[in-house]
């Protein structure tokens, strides 16, 4: 018998999958919005690292989309509002289409 500590947000079906694998999950529901938001943001970082490690797999990208969807629902963001903010920022700061990789900046102080 082994015990593995996760302490992280998981998809809704994970506890049932664990039970079907003849293991016993210990879980709780995050009823506090602040706790849920923090867990979602931690999950986003986790999934971003997995996307990086996978060198851009579609499956990992889909995981990020699912986490972002949950964040949007929690914070009340509409897709049109997010797209508008994205376009506004792209207009002000640019996008990533030029593939610019900034190596360093030398200041003239």
Image (cartoon, rainbow, N blue to C red):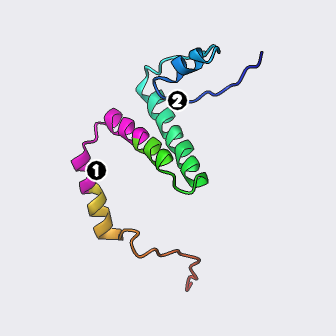
Q: In x, y percent, where is residue 50? A: 58, 47
Q: Quadrant of residue 19?
A: top right
Tell me if residue 91 comes above or below residue 78 in the rendering: below
Residue 109 versus residue 65: which sits nearer the camera?
65
Residue 22 versus residue 68: which sits nearer the camera?
22
Which residue extends farthest right?
Answer: 1
Lower position in the chain sequence, tag 2 or tag 1: 2
Q: Quadrant of residue 108?
A: bottom right
Q: Which residue position is annotated with label 1?
A: 82
Magenta residues, start to end: 66-84
Q: Residue at x 43, y 39 (%)?
A: 67
In the image, residue 75 lies in the stretch drawn in magenta: yes
| Mark 1 burial class by Cα count in 10 Å: few <14, some 14-19, many 20+ | few
| Mark 2 burial class by Cα count in 10 Å: few <14, some 14-19, many 20+ | some
In the rendering, which numbered label is found on residue 9? Answer: 2
Q: Residue at x 54, y 50 (%)?
A: 51
Q: In which quadrant is the C terminus drawn?
A: bottom right
Q: In x, y percent, where is residue 64? A: 45, 44
Tell me if residue 23 comes above or below residue 63 in the rendering: above
In the image, residue 79 lies in the stretch drawn in magenta: yes
Q: In x, y percent, where is residue 57? A: 51, 52
Q: Residue at x 56, y 82 (%)?
A: 107
Q: Mark 2 and mark 1: span between their CA atoms?
A: 24 Å
Q: In x, y percent, where is residue 30? A: 47, 21
Q: In which quadrant is the N terminus drawn?
A: top right
Tags 2 and 1 touching, CB below 8 Å:
no
Look at the numbered disc 1 and give the secondary structure of its residue. Answer: helix
Tell me if residue 102 comes above or below residue 54 in the rendering: below
């Amino acid at each position: 018998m082994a015990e593995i500590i996760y302490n992280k947000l998981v998809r809704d079906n994970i506890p049932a999958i664990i039970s079907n694998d003849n293991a016993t999950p210990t879980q709780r529901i995050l009823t506090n919005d602040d706790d849920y938001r923090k867990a979602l943001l931690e999950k986003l970082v986790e999934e971003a690292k997995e996307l990086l490690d996978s060198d851009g797999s579609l499956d990992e990208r889909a995981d990020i989309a699912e986490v972002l969807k949950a964040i949007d629902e929690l914070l009340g963001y509409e897709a049109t509002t997010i797209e508008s903010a994205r376009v506004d920022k792209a207009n002000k700061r640019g996008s990533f289409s030029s593939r610019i990789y900034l190596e360093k900046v030398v200041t003239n102080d």
